[in-house]
Image (cartoon, grey):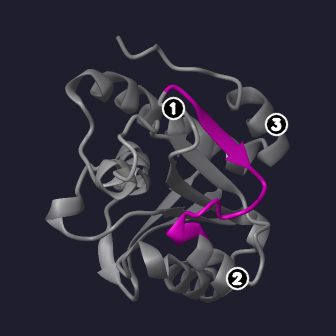
Amino acid sequence: MKYLIAGLGNIGTEYQHTRHNIGFDVVDAFVAHHKGTFHNDRLADVAEVKWKGKTFIVIKPTTYMNLSGKAVKYWMDKEKVPLENILVILDELALPLDVMRLRPGGSDAGHNGLKSIQDSLTTNQYPRLRFGIGNNYPKGRQAEFVLSKWKHDEIAIVQEKIDKCTEIIESFAFAGLPRTMNAFNNLTYPSVK
């Protein structure tokens, strides 16, 4: 069984470890946990992880966020991964920092990466893991906030959530989406002090 795990973000050092790039940080951690490595390929940095009889094709699109769908569609077709075996990992403004939500589908909620994937796949029914980044910013400063680095007092909780994402990805492949949603969607992570 093959799975396509797509972490969303923007390429370039100025975007590294920003809120908007949490998808990249999550898949980096997943691949490192499984002793894999990324290499540059068509439309994405790609790693292949084999674990307990499953194959994970892990991508970080190099298209920039707004064209993420091109990379997801290309690798889905190339690797013949069925739609239900895709998992997209992204930052989510609408969720507080201490929460993550796994969903089977839904609207793009104004997220350009999801909008691009929805346009490329011609459906919004594909699994996604929404990593809460909070929305603690002044009016009109959303773009600035999303592209900002984590505050010092947020780093521990972000790291804990990144580590938990490896378990969520593994559970998604082995237990399936409904059971993984039941197991992880109601968890909260230690409050930011």
Q: Secondary structure at mark 1?
A: helix
Instruction: Give yes or no for contact between labels 1 and 3 (Cβ–Cβ under 8 Å).
Output: no
Q: Residue at x 37, y 45 (%)?
A: 29
**Whether residue 169 is visible:** yes
Q: Secondary structure at mark 3?
A: helix
Depth check, mark 3 against mark 2: the one in front is 2
Disc nearer the start of the sequence (1/3): 1
Part of the protein shown in magenta: 98-114
Relative placement, left or right, of 102 versus 144 is right
Disc nearer the start of the sequence (3/2): 2
Q: Secondary structure at mark 2?
A: helix
State the quadrant of the C terminus.
top left
Q: Amino acid at mark 2?
A: Leu
The residue labelled by disc 2 is 121
* Residue 146: percent from left, percent from top: 36, 52
**Callout 3 environment at 10 Å: few (<14), some (14 to 19), or many (20+)?**
few
State the quadrant of the N terminus.
bottom right
Which image quadrant is residue 41 in?
bottom left
Q: Residue at x 63, y 80 (%)?
A: 76
Which residue is at the far left?
13
Q: Residue at x 35, y 31 (%)?
A: 159
**Callout 1 environment at 10 Å: few (<14), some (14 to 19), or many (20+)?**
some
Rounded to the nearest whole Å, what is the CA distance between mark 1 and mark 3? 16 Å
Rounded to the nearest whole Å, what is the CA distance between mark 2 and mark 1? 28 Å
Q: Which mark is residue 164?
A: 1
Relative placement, left or right, of 143 versus 102 is left
**Callout 2 environment at 10 Å: few (<14), some (14 to 19), or many (20+)?**
some
